[in-house]
Image (cartoon, helix red, strand yellow):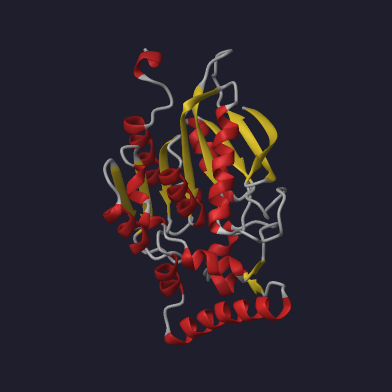
Amino acid sequence: MQEETVRFTGDGRRLAGTIRLPDGMAPGEKRPGFIVLHGFGGNRKSPNVLASCALYERLGYVTLRFDMPGCGESEGESGRVICLEQVEATKGAVSFLMTHPRIDSERIALSGSSFGAAVSVYTGAKDKRVAAVVASSGWGNGERKFRGQHPTPEAWARFTAMLEEGKRHRERTGTSLMVQRYEIVPIPERLRAHRRHGDVEMFPAEVPQSMFDFKAEEVVAEIAPRPLLLMHSSNDSVTPTEQSVELFKRANQPTDLHLFSETDHFMLSENNLRVIRVLEDWLAKYFPARAPAEVA
């Protein structure tokens, strides 16, 4: 597997990424590519990202994984993962990958999990250069998502009070109130091993506000006629399952939705054979690594 560390510009900042070519590429051959987006405060070395890339590479795709602004080795204020800024950074990644000599520039797809899934859907809707989108454990309405993640009246009151205090703090001091990650997105202890050392732990309060306001479901219909695959655990411990269901309701065709009973939030890190087979079958139909004529 040939691997290359790269730097490119996205949303006005220098971003760090890694490109990998699948085994078996002939000299001068071009293949379709996947840009794989990491989740909330993660980076390009997050287990879920590495697992996704390994799967796509095994199936014959070129992959690009990169650190969002404020994460990993990319430029930007640490932890400032503003949704629309991530969309612009992802558009920059598309522009960069289109110039790579081993990429079929008309066949670049986005793949993301959780926060990365929401950004993938929104970017795919707004950037017509994106040929396909795969979103797992994602969300389309930030306010409704947060209501599901802070379900009791007491938890919702604490969360919304934090948002308001963030605004007041900015007005009083001109600086950001910093918030611990699990105060924004609670994750059960049993799932925290899917995170890695180096993930962001503290975020400006403007981050949850940007997530609260972010509504990929309002633009998801614009992805069509390009294909969209939505995957979600039927009992997700982090992001409410209804988020992908609602995205599916609002999407146009071709869109597929698959719910899996024996997985959880980080499904592409769990080596679940049913998830893998669904993804493989969908790719073979809608976004094959090689055209039938090439295979023959």
Q: Is residue 22 above or below residue 5?
A: above
Q: Is residue 296 above or below residue 116?
A: above
**Residue at 58 percent of width and 75 percent of height:** 183
Q: Judge by depth and name the residue closer to the eye, 87 or 203.
A: 87
**Residue at 46 percent of width and 59 percent of height:** 265
**Residue at 65 percent of width and 37 percent of height:** 18
- Residue most extreme to the bottom: 154
Q: Position of residue 48 (x, y in %)?
A: 54, 49
Tell me how many marks there are. Answer: 0
In the picture, measured across the screen, residue 180 lies left or right of residue 87, that is right
Q: Is residue 71 above or below residue 24?
A: below
Residue 272 in sight here: no
Q: Position of residue 296 (x, y in %)?
A: 36, 12
Q: Position of residue 208 (x, y in %)?
A: 55, 68
Residue 95 in sight here: yes
Q: Judge by depth and name the residue closer to the eye, 263 or 133.
A: 133
Quarter occupied by residue 71: bottom right
Quarter occupied by residue 148: bottom left
